[in-house]
Amino acid sequence: MFTPKRVVLAHCDLPCGIYDPAQAKIEAQSVKACMEKYAASSDPDFKARAVAIKEARSNMVKEHLWVLWTDYFKPNHFEAYPQLNALFNETTKLAGAAGTKGTNDVAVAEKLISKIDEIAEIFWATKK
């Protein structure tokens, strides 16, 4: 009675058009901009606001990456791109306390953006 008559498989919960690594990249670029503005200012209040915004945006980078990692990418993607788990792990750490949340070094933000670009390259290859 409760046994399904038909089994269906779905790729994702919603149409795949909702996923895009550009969201993470935009936030990472905001992080970098906050770092640059922090470095250019001598106003302690402005610097404090820049750090607060940078940390919030860093967290948003992680959230966007986690959605891609856990919701978009499926087992067949990880089989085709065996480096993907390590790439996501490294990239989310670059947006965390050991990365952009914990420093005002623009080079760290640039590395974060570069890693997001690597994820984007794989993402777009899976969309073909």
Image (cartoon, rainbow, N blue to C red):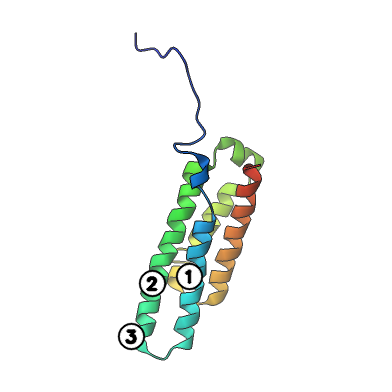
Q: Residue at x 54, y 54 (%)?
A: 21
Residue density around tag 2, few if under 14, some if 14–19, many if 20 or more, within 10 Å: some
Q: Quadrant of the N terminus?
A: top left
Residue 77 % position (x, y): 60, 40
Total labels drawn: 3
Q: Is residue 63 above or below residue 26?
A: above
Q: Earlier in the sequence, mark 1 or mark 3?
A: 1
Q: Are marks 2 and 1 in contact (CB under 8 Å)?
A: yes
Q: Is residue 92 above or below residue 128?
A: below
Number of the label disc, if any, that sits on residue 53: 2
Q: Residue at x 37, y 84 (%)?
A: 46
Q: Residue furthest bottom?
A: 42
Query: Label 1: which residue?
Result: 30
Q: Residue at x 52, y 68 (%)?
A: 29
Q: Residue at x 45, y 82 (%)?
A: 38
Is there any visible trace of residue 94 in the rendered image?
no
Give the amino acid at mark 2.
Ile
Give the amino acid at mark 3.
Asp
Q: Image check: 121 left or right of 49?
A: right
Q: Is residue 73 above or below residue 40?
A: above
SS for dot 1: helix
Q: Are marks 1 and 3 in contact (CB under 8 Å)?
A: no
Is there any visible trace of residue 124 in the rendered image?
yes
Query: Label 3: which residue?
Result: 45
Residue density around tag 3, few if under 14, some if 14–19, many if 20 or more, within 10 Å: few
Residue density around tag 1, few if under 14, some if 14–19, many if 20 or more, within 10 Å: some
SS for dot 3: helix
Mark toward the viewer: 1 or 3: 1
Q: Earlier in the sequence, mark 3 or mark 2?
A: 3
SS for dot 2: helix
Residue 106 % position (x, y): 54, 76
